Amino acid sequence: MIEQQTAMTEGDIIKRCQTGDREAFRVVVEKYQDVLYGTAYLMTGSRTIAEDHVQEAFLAAWKNIGSFRPGYPLKPWLVRILVNKVLSYQRINVNTMISLDDNLAIDPAGDDPAEDIAQRDQLRRVMQSLSTEQRQVVLLRYFAGLSLAETAAALGRRQGTVKSQTSRALEQLRELITNDNQS
Amino acid sequence: MKDEKNNLDNMENKVQKFFQKRAAAFKIGKDFWSKLEPRLNEKQSDAPAKRKESFWQWLAGPRLIAISSTLGVLVILATAGSLWLTRNNNINNSNTASVIDRGAIANGAGENYGVYSTATSVTLTNGMIIPQTTQVAMVTMTSPPSFNSSSGITFAPITTTNSTDTTGKQVISQASVALEVSDVSTAVNQVETLAQNLQGSVDNMSSSGSQNQQQANLTIRVPANQFLAALNQLQTMGTVESQNINTQDVTQQYIDLQAQLTSAQLEEQSLQAILAKATTVSDEIAIQQQLTQVISQVESLQGQINYMQNQVAMSTITVSLNTPTQNVGQAPSGSLTVEVGDVDNTVTSVKQLVASVNGIINSSSVSFDNGKESASLTLEVYRDNFDQVMTTLGKKGKIDQKTIQESTGTQTTGTQQSNTPPDAMIYLSLIQATGFWTAAHVTIIIAAAVILVVLIIIVAAAGRAGFLRKKRA
């Protein structure tokens, strides 16, 4: 029920965005900025680059919001724009290594900074254990929350390819995740 | 397999939980919108509404192709449909056109009409059926006939052949008929019998024969009021190769002869009276000499009158009978109906054509109906000119109907080299062509031209819009 209300509300917001309502677009930005930022950061490994990518993604969304059909989920569309920006950037600036810098913004409300650091390290090990393609698939599927079809569309791959990449990634993550959950 | 799937699902759940626990760590910062909003101003106008397309941009592309194709198909269908309808109308018009032969009407109802020739069987509007014939057939009409001139039918009025009518006319009727028969001697008997049956007689008869052909000529006399009946019956005895009918009104001559006779007779009576009163021998001799001359004159006049009366009372028919020449074969014949722009000029050119090949025009008639002129001609040409003449005639206009009966056997007669008359018959009908360009045609063509111009303008404008759009990009 809550999701339906949200979807309906999102449809109205989109319509208002299409009329040039910036406040409506602000609602969209504030709702999805963190998930886009996290995705971009985990893909690029740089906070500043990730923020630039997110800005560019939202600018492109604002420019093309007129062609977006209300009633369809907005997040996959935004993630797809973001992924295109990131991949275009990476084709020019080859950077497949993730380096989670120490200035990674963390929730200031976190109670235990040590726990945060531990989690960050854990996350780094997990992501580094995957290939570039597996990393992208895992991020979009389990971090951004996209479906198999939405992930395949965002990455420009076939669903079968995405599914097999996901399976291999999960196998590799089995031990790491198991240990994490046990802790 | 099921265990693997369960394991996979478990792993997915674990990975999801793993990322959910760490998602909160990724915060972009609360000032992100303040950094983003000015860039909205820079790169975008106030209303990011849907991209507007001009009408021509909207029209360009698949829509233009669809509209153009549909209009083009409609134009083609409309033009083809009008042409098909016109052809049918022309055919229908020619099939239903009726023309009254002025010559036939002139004689009025109740007269005898000579059907000169018909290419096909024709049903007249008065119900009478004229079978296909190349002969002169006698038809008595109760009302003037109407017929389709394209059938090749030609009417020729037949003069009444009664020797005298209530006005005292003296008419001599004569006819010559040439018949092709299978056996001459049998036909001779038939002709003799015919003459006897009609209270007539055979005046003379001659016959000749060769290995290839037998021939006989008879002259029969039949009472004048049996003249037509005799001709009708003769036509049934064989194939009529030719027939000529000649009527001569000798009333005035007869009256003159009668007057001369009366005068001479009066003179004779007068001289007889004077002779009776002669007193001297010399007077008697002189009067006797005059009387002799007058009597001679009376006898001569009487003889002429008797002869004339006999000729009037008994019509003369000369019948020529011959068997087909071996290997002669049947002459070709054909009928042609042609639509022409100018009937009169075409008739003139046809006559010139026939004359140039030493042919014969047996009959020619021109008539008008509802403002349209038509003509019917019966031609006889030499067999070796037949194909050429048919082809030339066909080129004079649009052929509505054409039938050809080829000749059979080798051609030893009917050719220019054989010293026999031309015998290849051509029945030609000329019909004034209806104007092709009717108002409906003109309208359709103008509409098609307008649609094409509109299409060209649309294509040009859409192409230009597409070009400009590319230029801006």
Image (tube, coloured by chain):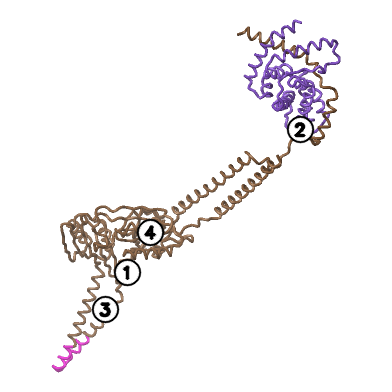
Chain colours: A purple, B brown
> Label 2 is placed on what type of residue?
Lys
Residue B283 in sight here: yes
- The residue at which mark 1 appears reads as B165
Q: Residues within 10 Å of mark 3 (few under 14, many from 20)?
A: some
Task: Name the image quarter holding the C terminus of chain A.
Answer: top right
Q: Are marks 4 and 3 on the same chain?
A: yes
Q: Are marks 3 and 1 on the same chain?
A: yes
The kind of secondary structure element at disc 4 is helix
Q: Nearer the viewer, residue B322 or B271?
A: B322
Q: Nearer the viewer, residue B17 or B318?
A: B17
Q: Position of residue B321 (x, y in %)?
A: 21, 60
- The residue at which mark 3 appears reads as B257
| Eye-nearest disc, 2 or 3 | 2
- The residue at which mark 4 appears reads as B392
Q: Residues within 10 Å of mark 1 (few under 14, many from 20)?
A: few
Residue drawn where x is 28% and y is 68% of the image: B173
Q: Nearer the viewer, residue B358 or A144?
A: A144
What is the C-alpha distance between the residues marked 4 and 3? 54 Å
Mark 1 vs mark 4: which is more N-terminal?
Answer: 1
Task: Indicate whether A64 appears above or below A95.
Answer: below
Q: Chain of mark 3?
A: B
Residue drawn where x is 19% and y is 85% of the image: B293
Q: Chain of mark 2?
A: A
Which quadrant holds residue B188? bottom left
Q: Residues within 10 Å of mark 4 (few under 14, many from 20)?
A: few
**What's drawn in magenta, residue-wise?**
B269-289
Instruction: Report the side of B461 relative to B327 (left or right).
Output: right
